[in-house]
Amino acid sequence: MTTLSVPLPAHLEEIVNSFVKSGFASNKAEVMRKALTRLAEEEAIKDVLEAQQEVREGKIFYGDLDELAKTI
């Protein structure tokens, strides 16, 4: 496991501390790990939703590549 040292503005440190105090996480490092995990999940969901929209708009080809090449 790697340790990162990241300076935080006071208002973000207060948020991290409040999560620890509320029991959301047992310590500051766990708050940050959970936050990064959620961010990664949100980005993955956003990517899937964008891809679905592109399919609906006809911006993405799908199917057999040989058949698609014949139609182009």
Image: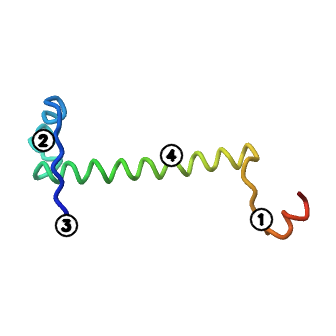
Sort mark 4 into few (<14), some (14-19) or many (20+) by Cα contacts within 10 Å: few
Q: Earlier in the sequence, mark 1 or mark 4?
A: 4
Residue 24 location (% of width, % of height): 17, 47
User: Which color mode does the image show?
Assistant: rainbow
Q: CA distance from mark 2 to mark 3?
A: 26 Å
Considering the numbered disc 2 on the image, is that residue within a helix, a strand or a loop? helix
Assign the N terminus to one quadrant of the image: bottom left
**For the residues bearing labels 2 and 1, Cβ distance under 8 angstroms:** no
Mark 4 or 2: in front is 4
- Mark 1: amino acid: Gly
Name the residue beneath numbered marker 4: 46
User: Considering only vertical position in the picture, is 56 above or below 69?
Assistant: above
Q: Earlier in the sequence, mark 4 or mark 2?
A: 2
User: At x 70% / y 49%, what residue is drawn?
Assistant: 55
**Frontmost residue, 30 versus 61:** 61
Q: CA distance from mark 1 to mark 3?
A: 42 Å
* Labels in figure, total: 4
Name the residue beneath numbered marker 3: 1
Name the residue beneath numbered marker 2: 22
**Frontmost residue, 22 versus 57:** 57
Q: Earlier in the sequence, mark 2 or mark 1?
A: 2
- Mark 3: amino acid: Met
User: At x 91% / y 64%, what residue is drawn?
Assistant: 70
Considering the numbered disc 4 on the image, is that residue within a helix, a strand or a loop? helix
Q: 19 left or right of 63?
A: left
Q: CA distance from mark 3 to mark 4?
A: 28 Å
Name the residue beneath numbered marker 1: 63
**For the residues bearing labels 4 and 2, Cβ distance under 8 angstroms:** no
Q: Earlier in the sequence, mark 1 or mark 3?
A: 3
- Mark 4: amino acid: Lys
User: At x 32% / y 54%, what residue is drawn?
Assistant: 37
- Mark 2: amino acid: Ser
